[in-house]
Image (cartoon, grey):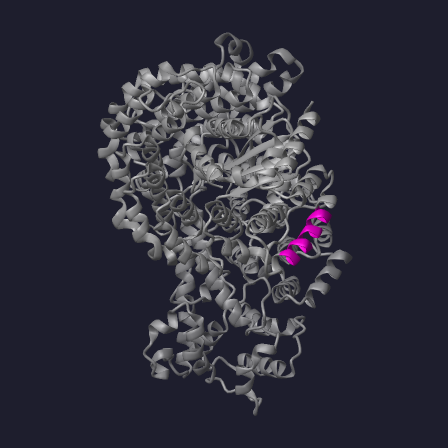
Amino acid sequence: MGIRFILMVNKQGQTRLAQYYEYLTLEERRALEGEIVRKCLARNEQQCSFVEHRNYKIVYRRYASLFFLVGVDNEENELAILEFIHLLVETMDRHFGNVCELDIMFHLEKAHFMLEEMVMNGCIVETSKANILSPIQLMDKAS
Amino acid sequence: MEQLKTIGRELAMSSQGGFGQSKEFLDLIKSIGETRSKAEEDRIVLREIDTLKARLSSPNTPKFKLKEYLMRLIYVEMLGHDASFGYIHAVKMTHDESLSLKRTGYLAVTLFLNEDHDLIILIVNTIQKDLKSDNYLVVCAALNAVCRLINEETIPAVLPQVVELLGHQKEAVRKKAVMALHRFYQRSPGSVSHLISNFRKRLCDNDPGVMAASLCPLFDLIVIDVNSYKDLTVSFVNILKQVAERRLPKSYDYHQMPAPFIQIKLLKILSLLGNGDKKSSEQMYTILGDIIRKCDSDSNIGNAVLYECICCVSSIHPNPKLLESAADTISKFLKSDSHNLKYLGIDALGRLIRISPEIAEQHQLAVIDCLEDPDDTLKRKTFDLLYKMTKSSNVEVIVDRMIDYMISINDHHYKTEIASRCVELAEQFAPSNQWFIQTMNKVFEHAGDLVNPKVAHNLMRLIAEGFGEDDDTADSQLRSSAVESYLRIIGEPKLPSNFLQVICWVLGEYGTADGKYSASYITGKLCDATEAHSTDDTVKAYAVTALMKIYSFEIAAGRKVDMLPECQSLIEELLASSSTDLQQRAYELQAVICLDARAVENIMPMDANCEDIEIDKNLSFLDAYVQESLEKGAQPYIPEDVRSGLSNISNFRSQDHESSTHALRFEAYELPKPSVPSKVPSVLSSSAELVPITQPSYVAEVHQPASSALTVSSSGSSELKLRLEGVQKKWGRPAFSSTTPSPSSSDTFGSNNGTTQHESISSTKSKVHNVSYDSRKQQTEVSSEKKKLAASLFGGASKSDRKQSYSGQKVSKTNSHASDKSIIAEATSSSDTAAVRPTSQPPPDLLDLGEQTVTSSAPSVDPFKQLEGLLNLTQDTTNLSSSGVSMPDAPDLMSIYADMSSSSQSTTVAPPPNVTKAHLAKQPSKGSNVQEFLEKDALVRQVGVTPSGQNPNLFKDLLD
């Protein structure tokens, strides 16, 4: 299992989206998110986009006020995960148009639906934006 | 600007509010978004929880409202609060007809519940129904839920439908069905073992999405069993070729790269298939070369694919051309300004040096830059690399660096890792004992609580055994320097327990050995240490034993023992300790210092911890005595099993003392009838509450003829003897590189190897010392400092540079290389160690890793396995002797016992009572002394008084 969790956290350390691919209790999640965000916020632009934390490797990328953090295990290609984050953002951008933190907050379920298409069982399964977005568009039409 | 956008969005949202989201929802999200502190956020969420509880419990909430409440519940949990009160509503919503409500319901359920939650059972039915739906989006939603919620027990409920869906006409459904099956495989491989061929089938699916999905399960399968999938190599290569030639739909392109994520997955699979397989690897060379050539190295994603190619190239059977282009790519990475690329470069370098060690040299300055970078991630990656390229010529520099870094960080997880790496490297490559001890001291001082306790035992053994060469002066110098350094360190506050134990042991054994320090000085230091760590019983036990040794050595040397007042008070405190172990040690100490010099010398021989203990299993030294008794008319000894009519000899010898006590021991005790009449049997059986166990042990020891100093072990049962033999074998042979004993290659070049290793170490010794000295001196010259470091790490940087600074060491350097090489030759010729080695091994260069295999195979016996065996046994005996008085912290204390009894012959380990009895049985007519003692003992037990221990008469009696 490559991807262990995907988080979106803003500069203030508030969680905006959290998807775990392995079970953690509420307390564990809360502690983990706090520690990771503190670690990533302390880093500057020049430094690597990868951080080791406990037995995870965190790949993170910042977009304006929002951090995208992906926890992976040791075998994963870090740079590819970094680009996967960008693919996710591009996909959301295509759907929302100039995506921003508030879009994700107001349409949290849609952000999750996109992730459900892209990642299953901790693996990247879909990388075509058209395929990712078509179920969501169909659902929008239906309702 | 951003604010304007936000306002615009809010306006747009509120206009939507009519049909999508309510004003209430918008306000909630807005207020959460505007909070500036966690406390404020918590207040909002807690208020929201109250609102939701009230709303959800009201019966006629409209459905679209429910969906919104569910999203609000998701928020509550996401922000770290418990929303379990609403879980059931999420479950209910999965039953809804509307797709959007159903999918939201499934989403909420997957976010809230783990697969073992009680509510899952309510969803399985819905999932089954939805998997049969005509609407493929409903089926997809259900399959998403299957991947998150179905556990091992519920797999059979949905498995038939999932398998059917593998052939669904919609590619989206097929893709998710593949992943559902993958998930079943992850949870319970057995449940889907008959369906694994489906993954192969889906690899040939018309839809690239389904094909890509099937790579995930296939990857997992290949990791486990590569040989069953070798036939697919051609298919994977073909697919990769098609992907690289842009045959996939444009929508898979990412930043002008054709389906890079699929390429990466395929490369991962190929590197598994080609690992150690020349034939498979050859099928991949062309496509790998093509991809490396075509990759756009200006984009991140291009570099990600390139990196994966390097990983693949370094994993499969080596191909010179590919290795060359991989090396080129690595230099590009390392020269880049981007830290991410440098990171990948360092990682890739670590992979490639296994095959072509020489490429590290050209990048040495880049590596040093990364090592000195303030970025922790990069630094750690570089330490990983250095760890992989450590050898005896650069171990000092690398380990010093690692320790400096270890001291500077607080992260326990990584500190543990780096500490154990330091220990491992030091044990494998230490150029000198001096250095090894200093290094271990540093590791212990700063991360003692994090390292494996075995490391402490290794260190003690090393100090005791010395280099293994017959050079006593060097050994005693080593010990003196260890003692000196420990006396310096012992005063520091907050030392890890592990380390203090080592210190106490060394000070006890060797503190007064060279006459530099007086006994009172050492004992004072020991007492201070116990005072400073008064809660640590293990340290106290070590300290008391150390005190006993020092006093014994004093007595044996004919000096008068002046016990310091603080020692006296310490011993008094321990006499009344609640730990029986500490008590016993204190009593033993008291008893020993009352004896005369001759006895003490036998009990506590100086520096005897390495001597082999020979055990006379038949107690032949007693033969004369027995003969004499028989002549005087004594009854001959009848073996116990014959006497009691029990034939279960095996039981008697079995280690399971539980059964043996019940079966045999009580029988044996009946022979000598003590004169204390009424209560004897009950005393024996109810002795659990009684403390006085120490006394019989003294007797047993001391009444042995003085000629045998090894009372404990010699009087032990045959079981005990066997154990000890094993231990000695281990300790006879000096080898401090015992971290990774590999059973496979042990016998082939056992002792021979040991000597070679020492040669190499000693020849490098002089040289490396100079190097480290040099590099320290150069710290002032900023410009050349890096080059120096590089040279010391990589062995030979630019030749001219080295000539200037290292001309003096050149000779010894080549020496060391020669010996390195000989070792490698030996390693390759005589050991087929488990490590997979490339067949076309390049000539051993500066970065050879061959040595690792050598050292790993040095010790043939794991000392700790045996120590454990010993430990179990001693535990048994002590438990017996302490008659079941509760032993706090047993394993630790026992390990001390093991240590004492085997290494220092301290004679104070209480022999099991049955040993005493055996003697009695053998000498039934020995006379009144024993009987007298037994009477006393029985009396004491009955009264329940702790024996004073200061009963010199008793010992005198028995000794004479």
Residue B507 visible to the viewer = no
Residue B772 seen in the current view: yes
Q: Name the residue nearer the viewer: B535 or B197.
A: B197
Count of labels in the image: 0
Give residue B293's position: percent from left, percent from top: 36, 14
Quarter occupied by residue B58: bottom right
**The quarter of the displayed image where residue A42 is located:** top right
The residue that appears at 36% across and 83% down in the rendered structure is B643
Q: Residue at horizontal 43%, vertical 83%?
A: B667
Q: Tell whether position B33 is magenta.
A: no
Q: Position of residue B44 (x, y in %)?
A: 71, 47
Quadrant in which the N terminus of chain B appears? top right
Q: Is residue B721 above or below residue A126?
A: below
Instruction: Give the image location of residue B890, x and y in percent.
Output: 56, 62
Of all residues shown, which one is farthest toward the top? B800
Q: Of residues A77 and B765, which is closer to you in this image?
A: A77
Is residue B47 highlighted in magenta? yes
Measured as percent of width and height from the top left, residue B382 is found at 52, 26
Q: Pick whichever, B106 or B61, lies toward us.
A: B61
The answer to which image quadrant residue B124 occupies is bottom left
Outermost residue, right side: B565
Q: Is residue B636 left or right of residue B398?
A: left
Up-down: is B236 above or below B550? above
Range of residues picked out in magenta: B42-55
